[in-house]
């Protein structure tokens, strides 16, 4: 699987989980916690793959515009990973603030995904080419497997 396809597949999975999370109510505390933990795991792995493998190759192949997109995407990761997600993980799942924070997480991630899929990925396909994207995809799949195993998750 090439790198862009792998990342888009991750995006689909996270978007589906975010939709399920948004549809929960204050009574669905276990469902909320399960989904949130899955989202957290998937985002951690996805961010690691992008920042360690995909983004460096993208920036190296590109120029100033690609570098600008890279820093913006990285900042969006930081906002989710360091602020929004930890806040949500520490919010009681049966509280009203949980729903609001979950909605903000969903909106931030949907914005980030849209930018990557509409701007970054098409540029990456042109800059990197099919062969390089296949190589990156293999590296990413291998790294993803290692990360899941180290987190105690089956592949």
Image (spheres, grey):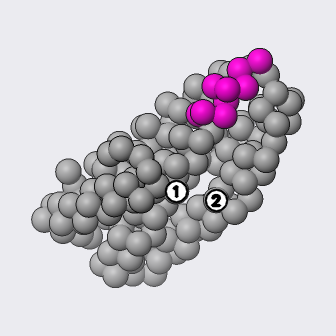
Q: Of the residues under marks 1 and 2, which one precedes in the sequence?
A: 1
Which one is in front, 22 or 151?
A: 151
Distance (Cα) linking label 1 and label 2:
8 Å
Magenta segment: 27-35
Q: Along the horizontal axis of the image, is 23 left or right of 15?
A: right
| Contact, mark 1 vs mark 2 (Cβ under 8 Å) | yes
The label shown at residue 81 is 2
Q: Toward which corner of the image does residue 12 lie, by quadrant?
A: top left
Q: Is residue 52 above or below residue 15?
A: below
Q: Which residue is mark 1?
A: 44
Q: Is residue 31 magenta?
A: yes
Seen as rendered, the residue at the extreme front is 152
Report helix, strand or loop for mark 2: helix
In terms of depth relative to the viewer, which is nearer, 68 or 145?
145
Q: Secondary structure at mark 1?
A: helix
Q: Is residue 3 visible?
A: no
Q: Residue at x 59, y 33 (%)?
A: 35
Coordinates of residue 155 in the picture (x, y in percent)? 32, 45
Q: How many C-alpha atoms fall within 10 Å of the one at disc 2: few (<14), some, or many (≥20)?
A: some
In this picture, residue 38 sits left or right of residue 146:
right
- Is 89 colored magenta in this rendering? no
């Amino acid at each position: 699987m090439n790198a862009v396809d792998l990342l888009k597949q991750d995006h689909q999975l996270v978007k589906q989980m975010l939709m399920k999370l948004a549809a929960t109510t204050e009574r669905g505390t276990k469902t909320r916690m399960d989904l949130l933990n899955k989202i957290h795991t998937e985002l951690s792995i996805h961010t690691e793959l992008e920042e360690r493998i995909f983004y460096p190759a993208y920036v190296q192949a590109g120029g100033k515009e690609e570098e600008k997109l890279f820093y913006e995407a990285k900042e969006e990761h930081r906002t989710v990973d360091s602020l929004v997600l930890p806040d949500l993980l520490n919010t009681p799942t049966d509280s009203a603030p949980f729903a609001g924070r979950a909605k903000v997480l969903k909106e931030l991630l949907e914005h980030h995904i849209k930018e990557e899929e509409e701007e970054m990925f098409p540029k990456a396909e042109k800059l990197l080419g099919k062969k390089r994207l296949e190589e990156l995809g293999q590296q990413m799949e291998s790294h993803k497997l290692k990360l899941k195993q180290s987190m105690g998750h089956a592949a």
